């Protein structure tokens, strides 16, 4: 802490000498208060819920609220920073955690990774949930997130309680649900999907029926050439949305004006990473020659930022539209894709000489995508009725 204080003092003194203005350096008390808040935030930045989680979330928010504005800027931990509580991500009160009891015999559990960006959660995840409830009025739609880290963040910051898988399934059992249909909003059959299915296996004897609908992009397929109607529909939907939001006449018109569409996914080390290669294949087969697929994680390799920049450059484009090919436009879209840090995709494309036009919108905000989730759920509901 003394080292940190010395660095801060040096910076403050330098600014004072340059500007002739006196600034008060942070005190030991300031640094201690900030560190305490950071430690409490780090304590809830975990994937495992315990009997202490609720109290820990409350303690972290209480410590944050007790800080002065100057002390809040000093918060720094392994995961903690001033944005954890301080960033404005939209109005959480517009959301509905769908954790109510009184479910009835038939439940449609919508399982998402989740996001702490309130606006995206309302626009994308709640948008999908609302579409499913409208399509299946005889089923009670409920929500579960698989990312406890996100659940804790939203709970601590906004006082909104979202069920994890165990909580949601226990709630269903306690409410006497007999038929459980699970619709994941996951993009593919990846790690999150596998973990969801493992959690469901533990409740196999608790319901008369458990059925799982397909994730957005459907069956995975064996290699980059294996594509399906779901992948084609998502490609068409996201490109159409890009054209509309960008004011282009068509994908060809954008291409002729030197504009490439770069779609940023998450990426994964799971065997399901072939899905991104399949999406790239699908884009080309449809005829979207100016569409490129990238990933935050750079897996598969051809989706890394360096590889995509090189591919776009070789194709002769001068400008790029960056848009997430993720269900939600959360942290990855706002920071990794469109952020101002030098390692964001926006900054790296700009450094390579491109004009960059970010479009921050999740797939969940597109009506055609919502309709795809409804169709996947319909397939499963119909199979129960047979």
Image (cartoon, rainbow, N blue to C red):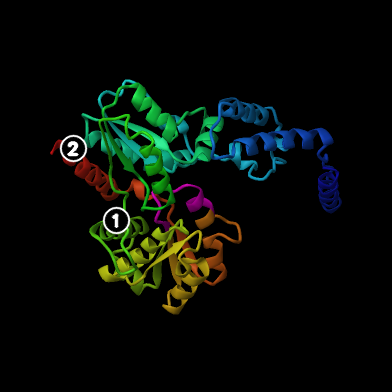
Question: Which residue is found at the position 78% from the left and 35% from the top?
Answer: 32
Tell me which corner region of the image, top left, top right, bottom left or bottom right, holds residue 100.
top left
Q: Relative to residue 245, is residue 67 depicted above or below?
A: above
Pick whichever, 128 or 197, lies toward us. 197
Mark sitting earlier along the chain (2/1): 1
Quick one: which residue is furthest to the left in this view? 386
Q: Where is residue 56 in the image (x, y as percent from the top left)?
A: 61, 28
Residue 327: say if magenta.
yes
Left or right, 382 with reference to 78: left
In which quadrant of the rendered image does the C terminus lie? Answer: top left
Label 2 Cα neighbours within 10 Å, binned few <14 / some 14-19 / many ≥20: few
Q: Name the residue under label 1.
A: 219
Secondary structure beneath label 1? loop
Asked whether residue 338 appears in the rendered view, the answer is no
Secondary structure beneath label 2? helix
Q: Where is residue 220 in the image (x, y as percent from the top left)?
A: 32, 58
Q: Mark 2 points at which residue?
A: 384
Number of numbered discs overlaid on the protein picture = 2
Left or right, 240 with reference to 144: left
Label 1 Cα neighbours within 10 Å, binned few <14 / some 14-19 / many ≥20: some
Q: Relative to residue 114, is residue 291 depicted above or below?
A: below
Tell me which corner region of the image, top left, top right, bottom left or bottom right, holds residue 232.
bottom left
Per the rendered image, the range of residues in magenta is 323-335
Residue 271: say if magenta.
no
Q: Position of residue 262 (x, y in %)?
A: 42, 64
């Amino acid at each position: 802490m003394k080292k940190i204080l010395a660095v801060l003092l040096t910076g403050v003194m330098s600014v004072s000498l340059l500007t002739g203005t006196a600034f008060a350096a942070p005190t030991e008390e300031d640094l201690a208060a900030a560190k305490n808040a950071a430690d409490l935030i780090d304590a809830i930045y975990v994937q495992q819920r315990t009997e202490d989680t609720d109290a820990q979330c409350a303690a972290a928010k209480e410590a944050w609220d007790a800080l002065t504005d100057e002390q809040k800027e000093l918060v720094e931990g392994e995961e903690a920073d001033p944005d954890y509580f301080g960033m404005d991500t939209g109005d959480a009160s517009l959301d509905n955690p769908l954790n109510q009891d009184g479910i009835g015999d038939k439940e449609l559990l919508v399982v998402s990774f989740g996001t702490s960006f309130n606006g995206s959660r309302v626009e994308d995840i709640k948008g999908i949930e609302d579409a499913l409830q409208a399509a299946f009025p005889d089923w009670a739609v409920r929500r579960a997130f698989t990312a406890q880290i996100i659940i804790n963040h939203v709970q601590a910051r906004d006082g909104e309680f979202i069920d994890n898988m165990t909580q949601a399934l226990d709630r269903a059992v306690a409410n006497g649900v007999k038929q459980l249909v699970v619709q994941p909003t996951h993009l593919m059959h990846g790690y999150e999907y596998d973990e969801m299915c493992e959690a469901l296996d533990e409740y196999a004897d608790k319901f008369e029926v458990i059925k799982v609908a397909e994730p957005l992009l459907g069956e995975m397929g064996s290699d980059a050439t294996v594509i399906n109607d779901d992948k084609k529909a998502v490609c068409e939907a996201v490109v159409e949305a890009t054209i509309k939001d960008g004011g282009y006449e068509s994908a060809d018109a954008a291409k002729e004006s030197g504009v490439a569409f770069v779609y940023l996914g998450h990426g994964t080390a799971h065997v399901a990473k072939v899905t991104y290669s399949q999406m790239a294949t699908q884009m080309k087969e449809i005829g979207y020659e100016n569409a490129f697929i990238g990933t935050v994680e750079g897996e598969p390799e051809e989706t890394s930022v360096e590889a995509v920049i090189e591919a776009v450059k070789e194709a002769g484009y001068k400008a790029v539209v960056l848009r997430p090919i993720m269900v939600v436009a959360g942290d990855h879209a706002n920071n990794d894709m469109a952020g101002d840090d030098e390692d964001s995709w926006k900054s790296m494309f700009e450094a390579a000489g491109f004009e960059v036009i970010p479009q921050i919108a999740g797939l969940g905000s597109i009506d055609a995508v919502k309709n795809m989730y409804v169709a996947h759920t319909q397939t499963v509901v119909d199979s129960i009725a047979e």
